[in-house]
Image (cartoon, rainbow, N blue to C red):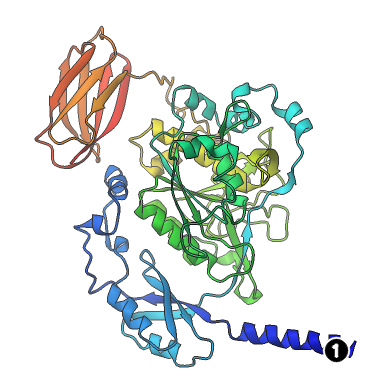
Amino acid sequence: MNKSISFLIASVILIASVKSQTPTKYWVKLSDKNGTPYSISTPTAFLTQKAVQRRTAQGIAIDNTDLPVTPSYVSQIEAITDVKVLYASKWLNAVVVQIANSSTAAIPAINSLSFVVNSQPANKFKVVIEKEVNYLENTQLEKTSNVSAGPAYYGGAYWQAKQLNVDCMHGYGYRGQGMTIAVLDAGFRNVDVIQAFDSLKNRGGILGTRDFVAGGNSVYEDDSHGMSVLSCMAALVPNVMVGTAPRADYWLLRTEDVASETPSEEYNWIRGAEFADSVGVDILTTSLGYTTFDNSSFNHVYSSLNGKTYPMSIAATMAARKGIFVLNSAGNDGGNSWNFIGVPADADSICTVGAVDSLGLVTGFSSKGPTADGRIKPDLVARGGKAYVTNSFGGYSFGNGTSFSCPVLAGAVACFWQRHNTYSNMKVLDTLKLTASNKLNPNNSMGWGLPDMCALPVGIASYKIEEVPFSIYPNPFNAEVAIETESNFSKESTIEIYNVLGKKLFKVNEKLKSGKTNLNLSSLENGVYFIRLTNGNLSTTKKLVKE
């Protein structure tokens, strides 16, 4: 007994010793980006062409926040004894450093640098992943009673698609083609082997993966939460489960470690969001939320939930400013002592997503607003009460949580934006709010409500989605493009070309016939344009890129 007690005491001492030697991480804010070798005039040195095109299409200028952190600043900080720079945030112009626990001179040395504004501990965060409540593994009875009446093609996911009328978009052929969605989560276990994602993998729809927790690109052995989240959008098994954006492309980014209370999950998310921006994603969806830390003295406080205090919320707003449609789960704290949304759900210009049940009623667990500065949250809602998802065994289950309402809506938004491809991200959000079920009385439980993906706002008498059948190639082009139509038109057609600011640059009227019509556009400068073909009451607009 004495030996056991001695061993236990020794073990506790050893654990305490190991913890005391754990390096400390600090968030170091920098003053400027002076001396950078990068220039906003050559953005492809730090952004992909797709990221540049997204900004151009929405009239968003490339500015100082797009520039990487000044390399010489990073090297000067890392030259200090006992300091290792882990990563940098260009949007917030800061670095996260790791400092040996025994060091007493490192922080004063960092703070003495002329370009350092301040430094603060990047404390250990206790993340609240918006995990499903009452996750149901056996749901045959639920499936039979709740979804068997819907079209068989969607399987168990029919009603969550129907509530948003995204099946209407799918019926017109808009299933997310050409749209890129980044999913930031805790891991995507077995996405590489689960049947629900076979179609996604076989067509090359996973554009890439990154692990911002452990480093590298391997994300398929970690937590399964992100896998279930992904299934709400990308699953494609006809008559079993079809997600809301089954033909979109995806980046799978791991930013959260649920196995232990590791430091800096919020900063990992910032890194992931900046990466997603740089590779040109259109939509960023996250089912994570942060409210409490290991040390309660560092807990987020409601009075600071204004979207401008916590770095992750600031970064989420920045992502929206870059033209990305950002969605984040409201949280599962409804009815708890906290009750409110978390971080970054308080961010400005993003779509915070609450959860409703099969009747469109707000679930008891869905977190509520408003933000501390009085903004309505959530913005919109989707099915999160008994949502149909792919489970950790590769089967299909019902689960509860805003973790699922968020991606259900994200996929629907991808289809809506694909259809309305001249809209900015903010116009997409504003338009969807005006189509939503609670638009006349938005509140802090369900926001503007369930949006209708196949409707237009009040004031437009009718909505016709019929389009002029034409294709245009090559695209991108150098000088000349060809317009190819599928049939003769009975009326004169109008061809118009607009720049990204909506200014009409070119117009021609002619009677188009089936076959090919050539247009010489060599006078246009390189950039992104939109070409609109109108015949009678039918009209189609497509994006056009000149290189």
Q: Quadrant of the C terminus?
A: top left
Q: Residue at x 58, y 86 (%)?
A: 21
Q: Residue 537: image x %, image y %?
A: 32, 15
Residue at 64% x, 64% y: name it: 259
Where is residue 248? Give x, y as percent. 45, 37
Side (left or right) of 376 relative to 58: right
Looking at this view, is 547 or 368 the one in front?
547
Can residue 389 be seen from the camera position used here?
A: yes
Residue at (48%, 66%) from the top-left corner? 267
| Residue 114, quarter of the rendered image | bottom left
Tell which of 361 and 216 is nearer to you.
Answer: 216
- Reply above or below: 500 against 330: above
Helix, strand or loop for disc 1: helix
What amino acid does circle 1 point to? Lys
Q: Residues within 10 Å of mark 1 (few under 14, many from 20)?
A: few
Tell me if 46 is positioned left or right of 445 in this view.
left
Camera-nearest residue between 7 and 445: 7
Q: Position of residue 132 (x, y in %)?
A: 68, 49
Q: Is residue 220 above or below residue 174?
A: below
| Residue farthest along the left direction in this orientation | 523
Residue holding disc 1: 3
Number of marks in picture = 1
Compared with residue 300, is residue 481 higher up or lower down, i.e. above or below?
above
Taking the view exactly as shown, the residue that stands out farthest to the right is: 1
Q: Please give left or right for residue 12 compared with residue 437 in the image.
A: right
Residue 344 against residue 309 in the figure, above or below: above
Residue 168: image location, x then y, percent: 51, 24
Q: Quadrant of the N terminus?
A: bottom right
Residue at left offset 20%, top offset 13% = 512
One can see residue 245 in this view: no
Give left or right: position of 213 versus 465.
Answer: right
